[in-house]
Image (tube, helix red, strand yellow):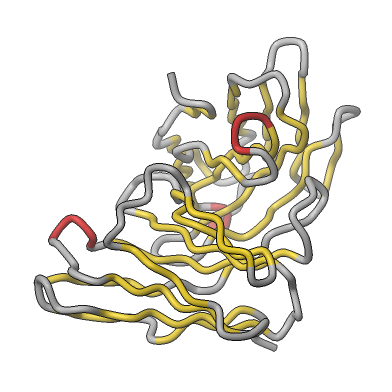
Amino acid sequence: RKEVEQDPGPFNVPEGATVAFNCTYSNSASQSFFWYRQDCRKEPKLLMSVYSSGNEDGRFTAQLNRASQYISLLIRDSKLSDSATYLCVVKGGNAGNMLTFGGGTRLMVKP
Amino acid sequence: DAMVIQNPRYQVTQFGKPVTLSCSQTLNHNVMYWYQQKSSQAPKLLFHYYDKDFNNEADTPDNFQSRRPNTSFCFLDIRSPGLGDAAMYLCATSRDRGTINEQYFGPGTRLTVT
């Protein structure tokens, strides 16, 4: 079983839609959680950290459920520019202080 | 203001011909990482340097080596590239190794092996 699992998608949504991604992690000792965004042929860029209380940044909301070991990302009012791969990333656990990446969920926002 | 710089952005090498990829940083971070990312896959950590201390991942092939001559620079050497080594190679840095430390990625070097 992979340490961080995501639905690879693609999620095809129209502009303006709300879309949610989920991610599960296997190691309960994991300590920090992030969502990264990666555009095609570019490097991953930090989108947001995920806090236990949940956090919001504009149209993006991240939630963490430690009991169920899943992380979610909600994107409201999708824009064409949101099209990218979203990587769920976990720190701590088996990898110590290193990052463990999920395989990514691809989002395509259509006009 | 580039913070993590990778050169070259695209590299073509021949099967078995040694190749070196370069990374530099202007952040004065203690930790530098090298990841390999193949198409449609997650980045996979190869190794990292904590200051001068080299830390290899258990499943990183011996074909991959690294050097960090100073704080700013880190190199990835592939001694005998195979076709399976074609990938994007990402360099990243962080101030420290603690869980609160964000990693900053460079733009990557896309390696083609012919």
Where residue B14 sits: x, y (%)?
11, 77
Horizontal arrangement in the rendering, residue A51 relative to residue A80 (left or right):
right
**Vertical side of A48 occupied by A24: above or below:** above
Q: Residue at x 71, y 29 (%)?
A: A30
Q: Is residue A72 left or right of residue B43?
A: right
- The residue closer to the viewer here, A45 or A21, is A45
Query: In the image, residue A48 lies at what x, y percent?
Result: 75, 49
Tally of numbered tags = 0
Identified at 56% across, 63% down, the residue is B54
Residue at the outermost front position: B53
Residue B21 position, x and y percent, is 38, 79
Q: Quadrant of residue B105?
A: bottom right
Residue found at the far right of this picture? A53
**Residue A73 at what x, y percent from top left?**
67, 34
Left or right of B61, for residue A9: right
Q: Locate residue B99: give its quadrant.
A: top right
Q: Is residue A37 above or below residue A101?
A: below
Q: Which of B17/A40 is in front? A: B17
User: Where, quadrant-wise, is the N terminus of chain A in this rendering?
Assistant: top left
Residue drawn at point x = 34 percent, y = 47 percent: B40
Q: Quadrant of residue A46?
A: bottom right
Q: Is residue B84 left or right of residue B37?
A: left
Up/down of A14 relative to B79, above or below: above
Please identify the residue farthest to the top as the structure is shown: A67
Which residue is depicted at the point 35% across and 74% down? B77
